[in-house]
Amino acid sequence: MHKILLVEDNELNRDMLSRRLERRGFELLIAVDGAEALACAVREMPNLILMDMSLPVIDGWEATRRLKSDAATRAIPIIALTAHAMAGDRESCMEAGCDEFETKPIEFDRLLEKMQVLLAP
């Protein structure tokens, strides 16, 4: 069973996505801000991180940069989740270190496909 860290400050988005992922057999860890995400990632070593980019305390871009600069967490794939779908937003997420990018509202089947690619051995 894959352990997924869902980093999302919006309660409705968090509940909907976590329920759908749990039904698909994923073990869910939850963080509501970037600082919590960093601590949880180091402690739990999830198989994949779903990172909202607009977060309180430490935003998703900075949290991703820190995770990717730490040898212990560098290899954990990160999918950016963002309502920002303007030109250049995907590039800025990838430059921060994200491995994939998904715009909100989340297209669940497309997100699952991206997760499966990144979780493949």
Image (cartoon, rainbow, N blue to C red):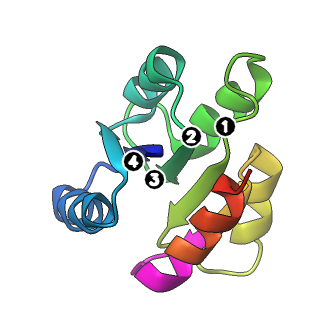
The answer to whether residue 43 is left or right of residue 116 is: left
Residue for badge 1: 76
**Highlighted range, magenta:** 102-111
Q: Earlier in the sequence, mark 2 or mark 1?
A: 2
Residue type highlighted by circle 3: Ser
Q: Earlier in the sequence, mark 3 or mark 1?
A: 3
Q: Is residue 115 visible?
A: yes
Residue for badge 2: 47
Residue for badge 4: 6
Q: How far apart, in angstroms, are the residues tagged by discs 2 and 1?
A: 6 Å
Picture residue at 62% right of the left edge, 44% below the top: 61
Q: How far apart, in angstroms, are the residues tagged by discs 1 and 4?
A: 13 Å
Task: Label 3: state its secondary structure.
Answer: loop
Residue for badge 3: 54
Residue type highlighted by circle 1: Ile
In the image, is residue 7 above or below residue 58? below
Q: Residues within 10 Å of mark 1 (few under 14, many from 20)?
A: some
Q: Is residue 84 visible?
A: no
Picture residue at 71% right of the left edge, 34% below the top: 65
